[in-house]
Image (cartoon, rainbow, N blue to C red):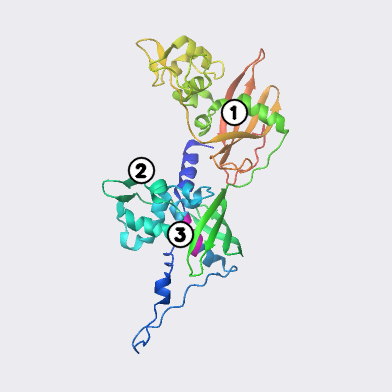
């Protein structure tokens, strides 16, 4: 896929998308529910009945609005978590902000008193503020408040299956593209513990991208991945945008390939970093990169890490990132290999990639290979790649 599309999709999904939901009902405390006047006055308003603990499992729109919409809009549905501790304070603060949207209006960013946020979040998520929320950059210790920085793109969700067992409500849902064209951009399953008083707490959420068919032999796929894909850096920097030739890649990224794979065999520390200030002769760096990418020396020297005064490159290391890639399918013809490469977030499943691209590699007659091109599949869900098709 292309850099813009990937960033757009990934940010839209992970920022949290949904129709702007109505505020969720507040759970009624035991004291409030038991406080009944002995002699009610004639003018007193009749007490509203308590919210039922068991919702109508056939009313998917109501289930979506009550339990999923705000989870989606806050970003909490755009990630997989087996405990609310792993959601992240950013999504929790946004969940509270959605509760306050009527008062907040268009005013953003804003700050919310920490006590109010934590008390409200505690009603719906079993989290410890000290170990989960206050360690996040959204928390301002001096002001004892959380910052609200606005919401992401707006998508919609719809529950498509519901079950209830021993007070645990399980909802399967689909999330649709902001383009409103009916495209499902991911699916999820959320589990919610219901309370007798009508309240609830979210327990876990699983996010799944659309299924992509896996082809070929598993051992061959892994061999191709180790040889051609894993060297492209786990964070996928070289596979986040289209390039029809290596000269369309960023010069820095070509240099990253050399550093990540330590093509010069220089000493690194346990974190994968070179010694501070380490440099390597330009001729050696450029020759090593050109073993894998057919690019002019002049183009490589446009990298910000090239030092003209010493005719060398400043070495960098420590490439982080929780993403990963795999080979989903492949084809080989006349010394050229085309690979369907899936890219994933840290919690994605192997057959549910975040996006898919076609990586083309050409074998050299005397051994070795050259990367030729990479093209992201723009259809969503990604259609299976027709190898060697025009």
Q: Nearer the viewer, mark 2 or mark 1?
A: 2
Measuring 39% from the left and 77% from the top, which residue is drawn there?
35
State whether residue 181 appears in this view.
Answer: no
**Residue 30, relative to residue 201: is it above or below?**
below
Q: Specify start and end residues of the magenta stretch as a single range.
A: 66-71
Q: Is residue 321 magenta?
A: no
Which residue is under mark 2?
137
| Mark 1, secondary structure of its residue | helix
Residue 246 is situated, as x and y percent measured from the top left of the image, at 52, 24
Which residue is under mark 1?
229
Q: Nearer the viewer, residue 345 or 254?
A: 345
Measuring 38% from the left and 61% from the top, which residue is drawn there?
99
Q: CA distance from mark 3 to mark 1?
A: 42 Å
Mark carried by residue 10: none
Mark carried by residue 124: 3
Decide which of tag 2 and tag 3 comes sooner along the chain: 3
Measuring 56% from the left and 34% from the top, which residue is drawn there?
324
Residue 241 is situated, as x and y percent measured from the top left of the image, at 50, 34
Name the image quarter holding the C terminus: top right
């Amino acid at each position: 896929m292309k850099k813009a599309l990937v960033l757009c999709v990934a940010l839209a999904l992970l920022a949290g998308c949904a129709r702007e939901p109505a505020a969720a009902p507040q759970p009624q405390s035991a004291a409030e529910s038991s406080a009944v006047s002995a002699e009610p006055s004639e003018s007193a308003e009749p007490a509203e009945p308590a919210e039922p603990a068991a919702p109508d499992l056939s009313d998917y729109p109501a289930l979506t609005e009550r339990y999923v919409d705000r989870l989606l809009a806050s970003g909490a549905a755009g990630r997989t978590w087996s405990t609310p501790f792993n959601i992240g304070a950013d999504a929790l603060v946004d969940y509270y902000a959605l509760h306050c949207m009527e008062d907040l209006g268009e005013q953003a960013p804003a700050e919310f008193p920490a006590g109010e946020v934590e008390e409200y979040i505690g009603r719906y998520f079993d989290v410890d503020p000290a170990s989960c929320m206050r360690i996040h950059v959204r928390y301002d210790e001096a002001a004892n408040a959380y910052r609200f920085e606005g919401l992401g793109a707006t998508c919609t969700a719809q529950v498509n299956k519901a079950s209830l067992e021993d007070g645990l409500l399980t909802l399967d849902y689909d999330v649709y593209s902001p383009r409103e064209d009916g495209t499902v951009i991911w699916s999820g399953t959320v589990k919610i513990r219901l309370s007798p008083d009508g309240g609830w707490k979210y327990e876990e959420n699983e996010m799944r991208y659309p299924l992509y068919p896996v082809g070929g032999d598993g051992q061959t796929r892994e061999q191709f991945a180790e040889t051609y894909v894993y060297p492209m850096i786990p964070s996928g920097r070289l596979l986040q945008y289209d390039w029809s030739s290596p000269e369309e890649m960023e010069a820095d990224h070509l240099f990253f390939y050399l550093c990540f794979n330590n093509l010069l065999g220089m000493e690194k520390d346990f974190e994968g970093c070179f010694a501070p200030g380490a440099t390597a002769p330009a001729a050696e760096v450029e020759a090593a990169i050109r073993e894998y990418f057919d690019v002019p020396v002049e183009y490589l020297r446009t990298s910000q890490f090239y030092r003209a005064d010493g005719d060398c490159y400043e070495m960098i290391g420590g490439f982080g990132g929780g993403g990963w890639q795999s080979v989903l399918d492949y084809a080989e013809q006349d010394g050229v290999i085309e690979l369907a490469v899936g890219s994933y977030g840290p919690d994605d499943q192997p057959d549910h990639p975040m996006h898919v691209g076609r990586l083309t590699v050409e074998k050299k007659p005397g051994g070795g290979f050259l990367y030729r091109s990479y093209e992201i599949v723009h259809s969503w869900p990604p259609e299976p790649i027709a190898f060697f098709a025009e």
